[in-house]
Amino acid sequence: MPRRAFTIIEILVATIILVVLAAAVVPRVAGLGWFSHDSAMTQMEQVLAMFAYRESSGTQQVALMRDGETGDIALVVMKRPPGLEAEAQWEYDTMVKPFRVPNEMELVSITADGQELDPRTWMIASIPSGGRPEIVMTWVGPSGETELRLPSTQLIPRRADNGVSLVAEREGVDLDAGGLTQEDW
């Protein structure tokens, strides 16, 4: 029985099919890294926003904490058990699910009011008399670097991916200089 080899046409057709499949699959697989990064940063933004909201509207002292063993970032509240001798202690907030940091993401730096903290384990608490520090986090993942900044006076964090802010900065307007202080509203 004679052996049959592949013809040049068959090889070309097989190559074209493989190129078309690769062109369809590679961009989708490459985009998964960005989707994972974006999703993780959106979740972290929500945890920061909840921390700011709970601090500004609640009566309990709240804190953000990173567990050194699991790496999770959680919102915790100061609980005072009944009784005068009972000591207050931090407990996980049951309303906010801890943020599980994806394996491909790394927190490379975190500051609270300009003070550098250890990215592996830290706690940032609100001040009992009112107020919270400005928090700046820098994350690195498969799609580059993301900075999350929660100013002490705002409820929503600002996000910048690879140095580009996702929300345009608002400029202050001097109404006196513009002669607009006497305008009818």
Image (cartoon, grey):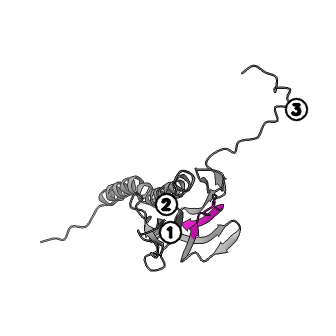
Quadrant position of residue 23: bottom left
Residue 177 disc label? 3
Q: CA distance from mark 3 to mark 2?
A: 44 Å
Residue 122 x/y as whole percent? 56, 74
Residue 37 disc label? 2
Q: Which residue is mark 1?
A: 105
Closer to us: mark 3 or mark 2?
Answer: 3
Along the polypeptide, which appears first: circle 3 or circle 2? 2
Name the element at disc 2. helix
The span shown in magenta is 124-142
| Residue 125 shown left or right of residue 79 in the figure | right
Residue 115 x/y as whole percent? 69, 71
Identify residue type, mark 1. Met
Q: Residues at badges 3 and 2 in contact (C-beta under 8 Å)?
A: no
Residue 102 visible to the viewer: no
Q: CA distance from mark 2 to mark 1?
A: 7 Å
> Quick one: which residue is furthest to the top in this view?
184
- Please check the rendered image and state whether residue 68 is part of the magenta-colored stretch, yes or no: no
Name the element at disc 1. loop
Dot 1 crowding, Cα within 10 Å, few <14, some 14–19, many 20+:
some
Quadrant position of residue 174: top right
> Quick one: which residue is furthest to the front in this view?
84
